[in-house]
C-alpha cells in the first residue's frame, strides 16, 4: 500500500479494464514472496507499447524497441513492458530481435531466473510455470529452462546471479553454477557500465560478496580482481569486516589495502568499475590516510605526544571526514593498535586551524617579502606557518606571522 504500490495497482486496473492481460513481474513479486521491501514495480502486459502510450496520459517511451514504456502516475514512474520473447542472439549482450507475444507464458520463458519468472495478476493469482515459488522457498537461484543456453545468451545473467546471492543470501543451483563457470572465458564481452552497476549492488547488499563462488567459477576477474590463492585469507578478512563500515569509498579502500593495491592501482580499479570522479578521489585519500596510520600507529615505541602530533598533521592534511574513515579501516585491520574515534574528534576540535586558508595572512601578504617574486616558496612558507600555528609554536596573528616569515627569508638568504 505504498504510493508506488497504489500506482502499480491503478495501472494494472486500467490495462485489464481495456481488455489486456497485465501482471506484476520480476523483483517485486519475488520480494513480496520473501517478505523483503520492494525496490521497483515492473508490469508486463499483452498491450503493445503504442497502446500503453495511448491508455495513459503521462508516458515516456523508455525503450520502445524492446517494448518498454514508462507510465507516470501521480509522480510515480512504473515501467510497463509488452510481453515479448527474444529470438536469435547476434552477440551475447543484446537480443537481435524482439518479438512481441500475446501470452504471459512466452514472456516468462525469456527471463533469467525462476525466482524472477513469476507473474502476479490483479487478483493476486500467481503464474509460475518454472517452479519459482519452490526455488524461492528453497533459496535457490536457478536459470529458466536450460541454464547453459540462458547464460550463454546473455552473460550479464551470470553477474546478476552473484549479485542476487549477495542480496538474498541464496545459493546457485548446481547445473546453473556449472553453466556460469563454463562462460567465464567470455566475460570481457560484458559492458563495463553493467558490471559496475552489479558490483555496486553487490557491495551494498545485505549479505556478503560470494567470493568463494566467484573464485571457483572464474568470475572474480570480471570485477578486475585478480585471484591468487594467497589472497583468499585476506578476502575473508574483508568479507568479515567491510560490513562494519557504512562509507562505500572506505569499504573499497579497505579492500584495496587487503589486496596491497597502490593508490594509483586503486584509482584505476575504481575507474574500471565506473565509479564517479568523487568516489575515486575520496577513496584514494582514505587509502593514503589509512596507510599512514599503519606506519605511525602500529609502533609500540611511540609516545602519546608523538601520536598526538601525528593525528594533528593527519587531520590537517586530510580533514576530519577522510581521517575518520582512515581510522575505521585502521581499526578493522589492526585491532590491537585501535585508535579511539572520539579522541580523533577531540583532537580535531582543539586544533587552532584546520587548513592554511584559516591563517591570518595569505600568499599576497608574503609576496612583497621577496621583492614581489612569486613561486613555490609561497606555498611552502604558508605550509610552514600553518604547521607552526597548528602545533602551537606560533600564534595565529598577522603581524607575528609576518615577522616570523621575514626572519626565515633573511636567514635563508644568509645561508644561500
Ligand atoms: P531489482 O530488485 O534489482 O529491481 P529485479 O529482479 O527486478 O531486481 P531488474 O533488473 O529490475 O531486476 O529486472 C526486472 C526483471 O526483468 C527481472 O526480474 C527479470 O525477470 C528480467 N530481467 C532483467 N534482466 C534480465 C536479463 N539480463 N535476462 C533475462 N531477464 C532479465
Ligand atoms: Mg526491478
Image (cartoon, grey):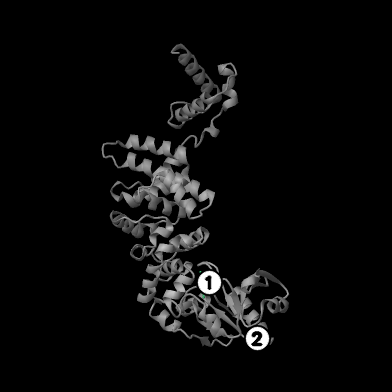
Per the model, the C-alpha gap separating discs 1 and 2 is: 29 Å
Q: Name the residue at 37% across, 40% down.
A: 292
Q: Position of residue 19 (x, y in %)?
A: 67, 88
Residue 264: quarter of image: top left
Q: Which mark is residue 283?
A: none
In front of the other: 200 or 342: 200
| Up-down relation of residue 251 to residue 311 (above or below) | below
Q: Give neighbour class at mark 1: few <14, some 14-19, many 20+ (Cα, 10 Å).
A: some
Q: Which residue is mark 2?
A: 20
Q: Which mark is residue 89?
A: 1
Q: Is label 1 in contact with label 2 (beta carbons under 8 Å)?
A: no
Q: Give neighbour class at mark 2: few <14, some 14-19, many 20+ (Cα, 10 Å).
A: some
Q: Position of residue 238 (x, y in %)?
A: 35, 56
Question: Does 373 sit left or right of 237 as displayed?
Answer: right
| Up-down relation of residue 410 to residue 224 (above or below) | above
In front of the other: 191 or 34: 191
> Element at badge 2?
loop
Q: Name the residue at 28% across, 39% down.
A: 299
Q: Position of residue 7 (x, y in %)?
A: 63, 76
Q: Nearer the viewer, mark 1 or mark 2?
A: 1
Q: Quadrant of the N terminus?
A: bottom right
Amino acid at each position: 500500500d505504498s504510493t508506488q504500490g497504489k500506482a502499480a495497482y491503478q495501472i494494472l486496473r486500467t490495462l485489464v479494464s481495456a481488455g489486456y492481460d497485465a501482471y506484476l513481474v520480476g523483483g517485486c513479486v519475488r520480494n513480496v514472496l520473501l517478505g523483503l521491501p520492494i525496490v521497483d514495480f515492473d508490469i508486463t502486459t499483452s498491450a503493445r507499447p503504442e497502446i500503453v502510450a495511448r491508455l495513459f496520459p503521462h508516458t515516456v517511451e523508455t525503450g520502445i524497441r524492446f517494448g518498454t514504456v514508462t507510465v507516470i502516475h501521480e509522480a510515480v514512474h512504473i515501467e510497463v513492458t509488452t510481453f515479448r520473447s527474444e529470438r536469435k542472439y547476434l552477440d551475447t549482450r543484446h537480443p537481435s530481435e524482439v518479438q512481441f507475444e500475446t501470452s504471459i507464458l512466452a514472456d516468462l520463458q525469456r527471463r533469467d531466473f525462476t525466482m524472477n519468472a513469476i507473474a502476479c495478476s490483479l487478483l493476486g493469482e500467481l503464474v509460475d510455470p518454472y517452479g519459482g515459488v519452490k526455488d524461492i522457498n528453497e533459496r535457490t537461484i536457478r536459470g529458466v529452462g536450460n541454464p547453459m543456453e540462458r547464460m550463454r545468451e546473455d552473460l550479464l545473467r551470470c553477474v546478476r546471479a552473484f549479485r542476487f546471492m549477495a542480496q538474498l543470501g541464496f545459493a546457485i543451483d548446481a547445473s546453473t553454477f556449472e553453466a556460469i563457470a563454463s562462460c567465464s572465458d567470455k566475460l570481457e564481452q560484458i559492458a563495463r557500465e553493467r558490471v559496475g552497476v552489479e558490483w555496486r549492488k553487490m557491495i551494498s547488499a545485505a549479505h556478503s560478496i560470494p567470493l568463494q563462488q566467484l573464485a571457483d567459477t572464474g568470475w572474480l576477474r570480471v570485477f578486475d580482481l585478480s585471484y591468487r590463492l594467497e589472497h583468499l585469507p585476506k578476502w575473508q578478512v574483508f568479507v568479515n569486516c567491510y560490513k562494519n563500515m557504512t562509507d562505500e569509498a572506505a569499504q573499497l579502500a579497505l579492500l584495496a589495502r587487503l589486496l596491497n593495491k597502490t593508490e594509483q592501482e586503486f584509482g584505476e580499479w575504481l575507474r574500471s568499475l565506473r565509479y564517479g570522479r568523487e568516489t575515486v578521489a575520496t577513496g584514494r585519500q582514505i587509502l593514503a590516510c589509512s596507510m599512514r596510520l599503519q606506519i605511525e600507529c602500529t609502533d609500540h615505541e611511540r609516545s602519546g605526544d608523538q601520536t598526538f602530533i601525528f593525528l594533528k598533521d593527519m587531520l590537517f592534511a586530510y580533514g576530519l571526514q577522510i581521517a575518520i574513515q582512515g581510522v575505521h579501516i585502521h581499526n578493522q585491520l589492526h585491532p590491537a593498535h585501535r585508535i579511539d574515534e572520539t579522541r580523533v574528534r577531540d583532537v580535531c576540535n582543539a586544533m587552532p586551524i584546520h587548513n592554511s586558508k584559516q591563517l591570518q595572512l595569505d600568499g599576497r601578504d608574503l609576496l612583497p617579502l621577496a621583492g614581489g617574486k612569486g613561486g613555490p616558496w609561497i606555498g611552502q612558507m604558508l605550509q610552514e606557518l600553518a604547521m607552526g600555528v597548528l602545533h602551537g609554536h606560533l600564534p595565529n596573528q598577522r603581524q607575528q606571522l609576518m615577522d616570523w616569515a621575514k626572519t626565515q627569508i633573511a636567514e635563508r638568504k644568509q645561508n644561500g
